[in-house]
Image (cartoon, grey):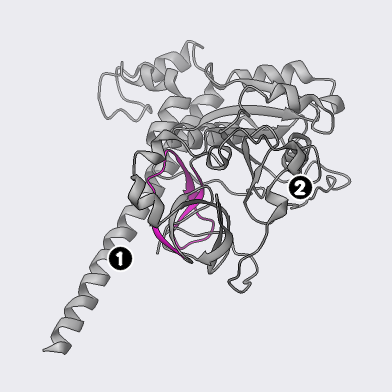
Amino acid sequence: MEPTCDRVENTPLMTRNYSAFLPPVDKIRQDVPFLTKLGWQTFFSQQTDVDELAATPPARVTQVHRNSVHVIGETVDMKVPIVPDVTIGDWVLLDQTSISRVLHRSSLIKRRAPGHDRAVQYIAANIDTAFLVTSCNADFKVARLERYIALAFEADVAPVIVLTKKDLTDDLTDYIAQAQSISETVPVVALNAKSDEPLEALAPWCKQGQTVAFLGSSGVGKSTLVNTLAGREKAETQDVRAGGSKGRHTTTHRHLHMMPNGSVVMDTPGMRELQLTDAAGGVAEVFADLFELSTQCKFNDCAHQSEPGCAVRAALENGDLDHDRFKRWQKLEAEERFNTASLSDRRQNDRAFHKAIKEIQKHNRK
């Protein structure tokens, strides 16, 4: 099985009340269907019918463990056995205490998993908005933000750059300018995560029935933002290590939280490594200006090195194209091509292996 999940403690299957997922009862709107608060939309209801929903009610995956997933629905709040390819945010149909079907996703954020096994790791499904969180300190890196934005674009998720710790810098204008230079289509929000600013600044995306995810490095304030939006302590927080800008890993696995306003928020562990795969479209969208420029090259397979009639090299030479941005574009494109090809080879090898096993089993039966 290619997709991998975060590994957490293996607890027995049992029905439990995950009250931490829900806001205080007195803050829950009673006039909105519970499934709507969980993020249920027309996209999902169109994949089923009344009879199937009655026999196998829908529920949403709020946590993924090694051998089980936690699901919450209108009448269920329990752990069930894990099935292949399921990830946090998925909508599933339940046959009593097991998953009968995983509904098609409206979006899927994924990456190449860390390590050398060339696996794909699913980060989250059915996310509407991805808040790409970075601090106004040494954690801020344009190259990393470009990766996150490419990831979101490819997944068909709306990205928003969130700059935290604005109260700790004298160069806020420069941070904002650098973030805005990445893409004209990506909003940039600067705030103090420990204040009430997130409630107003992030409100346009945290609406009823919407699912948002906080992505970023450790220590940038993702869990603090979750707590601020929730109005109470839902996620543990820790301070940044003394003497640097690197944070401690507070969140150890991904999980969904329901907010008082009816939105659903996903908190994630900090990702030290973000390798892109199957994200050619996302990279092209982040670097849309360079992609358009490359179409003006004399040769369709131009590598933008020393080929005659290269429009990209001409732009570099006359100063119309930033050299660092060009190098980041080439690096991401090369990485994406390599990872995609590697995963394609693995899929072919896996298919050949399973085919050989079936042939052996067939021969043994004879």
Viewer can see residue 220? no
Q: Which residue is tagged 1?
A: 350
Q: Relative to 344, does residue 229 appear above or below in the rendering?
A: above
Write down the quadrant of residue 29 in the picture.
Answer: top right
From the viewer's perspective, tell me whether residue 284 is left or right of residue 149. Answer: left
- Res 12 seen here: yes
- Is 343 left or right of 72, judged from the image as shown? left
**Residue numbers of the magenta segment:** 98-125
The image position of residue 92, as x and y in percent, is: 44, 53
Q: Amino acid at mark 2?
A: Lys
Precedes in sequence: disc 1 or disc 2: 2
Q: Secondary structure at mark 2?
A: loop
Look at the image and tell me in which quarter the C terminus lies. bottom left
Q: CA distance from mark 1 to mark 2?
A: 41 Å
Residue drawn at (76%, 39%) of the image: 26
72 vs 21, left or right, is left
- Kindly identify the amino acid type of the residue bearing the numbered disc 1: Asp
Mark 2 and mark 1 in contact (Cβ < 8 Å)? no
Q: Position of residue 132 (x, y in %)?
A: 62, 34
Farthest residue, direction left: 366
User: Circle 1 — which element?
Assistant: helix
The image shows residue 298, relative to residue 133, as above or below, that is: above
Query: Quick one: 246 or 360, which is closer to the camera?
Result: 360
Q: Residue furthest right?
A: 242
Q: Is residue 110 magenta?
A: yes
Label number found at residue 234: 2
